[in-house]
Amino acid sequence: MTTHETPAEARLLPATRRALAHRIARAQSEARVPSLVAGVARDGELVWEGALSALEGVEVDGDTQYRVGSISKTFTAVLVMRLRDEGLLELTDTLEKHLPGTDAGRATIAELMAHTGGLAAEAPGEWWERSPGTLRPELADVLGEEPHRHPVGRVHHYSNPGYTLLGALVEEVRGEPWEKVLRAEVLEPLGLTRTSYAPQAPYAEGWAVHPWADALLPEPAHDLGRMAPAGQLWSTTRDLLRFAAFLIQGDDAVLSAASVREMRTPAAPSLPGAQESAYGLGTQILSVAGGTLTGHMGSLPGFLAAVLAGEDERLAAVVLANTTSGLLIGTLAAELIGIVAEAEPSMPRLWRPMRETDPAVLELAGPWYWGVTPYGLHCGADGGVELRPLRGAGRAARFVAVGDGTWRGLDGYFLGEVLRPVRDAEGALTHLDLGSFVFTREPYAPDSVVPGGVDPKGWRGQGEWG
């Protein structure tokens, strides 16, 4: 086994580093993987990486390229989000509006990104992952005579042709090949110099491992052609850890934090038995014991890959292996995050006071009642507000100022909903309107504006009924 020491890694305890090394060693041995590389980052900084190779004369490390399969879809989704943010399209647009002539044009762009476009999982004809892309030179060859398996928008059904269409959409709008657009708009701005369309040395060869013997068979590594946006890319653990940091915090050179948060927001539930818990816009979302992880898994003959990141612990993990099957690679990446999170939890962010106060915002702070349910509204130093129930579970959410005195929900039940402070003719704050829910300073006060009104006799004891 080889490990890579970095200044940041010295901040991981020896016991934590050994636990990480032991976990990948056990995975390599039990799954009989020819080679495996893994890395963990905290706050975007590499804190540990390990590498194992069972092949004589073959050394691998965090700079070795592996094919990453469907992680390519997340990169394609980033390109689509950039088009949306530039105003060149809307996610609610049908594909036909921007890429006419396909038999899948009635699906919206968002539905294709979330795999709810109703399309088939695979391309027709020969197994596309193990045959050259020249067999499918046109979109019609990728879609076939009947591309749909389900009604559009009704069910989450993972579709590789769907992401081929999204790649073609990028090409149509930009007027450039998908690969060229990706390099100029994502790879170069993020400094992903070891992520590429075709393998660049040093890179791992793909292998299949015999199910009943310790023998290997080389797997082909074809150029996927039209299917490239669904699974073509090669990358390294170090590049993908940088990409994972981008998926959490964004980068204004590529996508804002708000846009990557939108990508991480569940857009479709997964089918029973699927490894992910939900699917966003080009991201897989896993519910684990420590919270929620976002990223993507990938596979092509000879390769398995996973990149996952957790916003709460600010940790990310990447695992790459050159084997066709046998390793639950997403589970392994999640467990690496769990090892560090449990042994060395992230220090809470330093609390800082507001730089400036706004009386109109401070006036919103404090207790509010939805009917008789008490809530607390907190004004943060970041300029946002947070509304949370004060007892038990309830509909909590963060809000960001829109600029017209209202606030837009960022998560939970109130995602996208408008929080509006309401004032009387004299300008006094009377209540909050949140998507028609009324929050008042007192529970059901006699002069309350709660819909349906309040009994004029107000609150009473049992002896006061009647």
Image (cartoon, rainbow, N blue to C red):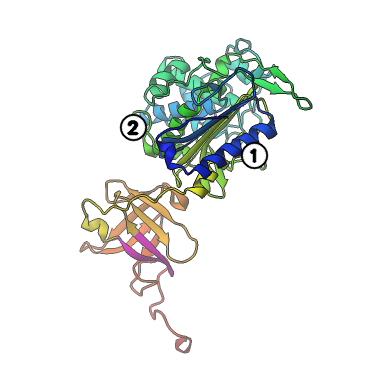
In the picture as drawn, the residue positioned furthest to the top comes out as: 134
Looking at the rendered structure, the secondary structure element under dot 1 is loop
Q: Position of residue 152 (x, y in %)?
A: 59, 33
Vertical relation: 201 (above or below) 395: above
In the image, which residues are magenta?
Answer: 365-377
Of all residues, the one furthest to the right in this rendering is 212
79 shown above or below 14: above
The crowding category of the residue bearing disc 1, from other C-alpha atoms within 10 Å (few below 14, some 14 to 19, many at least 20), is: few
Looking at the rendering, which quadrant does residue 118 occupy? top right
Q: Position of residue 384 (x, y in %)?
A: 32, 50
Q: Earlier in the sequence, mark 2 or mark 1?
A: 2
Q: Residue at x 31, y 51 (%)?
A: 406
Q: Amino acid at mark 2?
A: Asp
Q: Which mark is residue 274?
A: 1
Residue 328 in view (yes/no): no
Pick whichever, 311 or 70, lies toward us.
311
Q: Name the one closer to the observer, 358 or 84.
A: 358
Tell me the CA gap for discs 2 and 1: 33 Å
Determine the residue positioned at 39% across, 38% down: 249
Q: Which picture quadrant has residue 192?
A: top left
Chief SS of the magenta region = strand
Where is residue 234 drawn, in percent x and y?
53, 21
Side of 406 where 346 appears, left or right: right
Residue 232 is labelled as none
Residue located beneath label 2 in the image:
252
State left or right for residue 31 relative to residue 373. right
Instruction: Check disc 1 and give the amino acid type.
Output: Ala
